[in-house]
Image (spheres, helix red, strand yellow):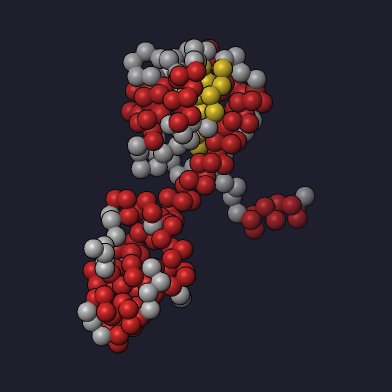
Amino acid sequence: MIRDNASASEEGPRPAAPIVYLVDDDPSVLRALTRRLLTAGYQVECFDSPEQFLGRRRRSDVPGCVVLDLQMPGASGLELQQAVAQTNDPLPVVFLTAHGDVASSVRAMKGGAVDFLSKPVRGEDLLDAIRLALIRGGAEREKRQKSREWGARYERLSPREREVFVLVVRGLPNKQIADVLGVSERTVKAHRSQVMHKMGVQSGAELGRAVEWLSDFFRATPAPNVGES
């Protein structure tokens, strides 16, 4: 027993349990779902309307997802889904409703919902949907974090270094880059070295892979168009 405690101490504190945000105007549904999810080891926060969720939800670094009803007084579940998707750190969404229809389910899934479940729901079906939502949310969260990290590196580049960045990613050798930019090959080598250093890569191939992480960043801050007619 003492060894177990020492081992746990060395490993440090356990990460906080994921948070499931329940949004439903039926108090009995909120109570039943809360009991089920607490038993499954999740943290739970309840809201009786989309407006309450948007106004009172506490921002958290703990992974989580939203389980919401479709039809509620005021804003609908679909409207809340859209609002959540437009935040800087969107959460995955699972719909749970007694009033679903094909058009609503299609719209929800096209909007990125993980699942569209009907009430009454089997406990395991709900838990399966939440587990999938947390996996998907974790992957999306990692992607956003990587994008922010690479975006911060890219922002350290000077305007000329960004032009060199674009041409290196296209696979152009130094001589061609020099011709496109109208500078000496020696100058290109110096800029290229700075690009590699600031971006934290060792080769043009690594720089090319970084572009995938920068895709979201470039949608907000377009890369320069260089050598294009």
Question: Residue drawn at (51%, 28%), measured in percent from left and top?
Answer: 94
Q: Does residue 182 lie above or below 20 as drawn?
A: below
Q: Position of residue 229 (x, y in %)?
A: 23, 63
Question: Residue drawn at (24%, 76%), measured in percent from left and top?
Answer: 181
> Number of labelled discs?
0
In the current view of this chain or complex, which residue is farthest to the right? Answer: 1
Q: Nearer the viewer, residue 158 or 174?
A: 174
Query: Quick check: can you spot residue 66?
Result: no
Residue 17 picture quarter = top right
Q: Position of residue 131 (x, y in %)?
A: 60, 35
Q: Position of residue 141 (x, y in %)?
A: 47, 47
Q: Does residue 28 lie above or below 124 as drawn?
A: above
Q: Does residue 39 lie above or below 221 as drawn?
A: above
Q: Nearer the viewer, residue 203 or 66?
A: 203
Q: Nearer the viewer, residue 180 or 123?
A: 180
Query: Quick check: can you spot residue 64?
Result: yes
Q: Nearer the viewer, residue 110 or 181?
A: 181
Question: Residue drawn at (52%, 45%), measured in percent from left and top?
Answer: 138
Q: Is residue 90 left or right of residue 122?
A: left
Q: Does residue 191 lie above or below 67 as drawn?
A: below
Question: Residue drawn at (33%, 67%), measured in percent from left and top?
Answer: 166
Residue 221 picture quarter = bottom left
Q: Position of residue 110 (x, y in %)?
A: 45, 31
In the current view of this chain or complex, which residue is farthest to the front? Answer: 229
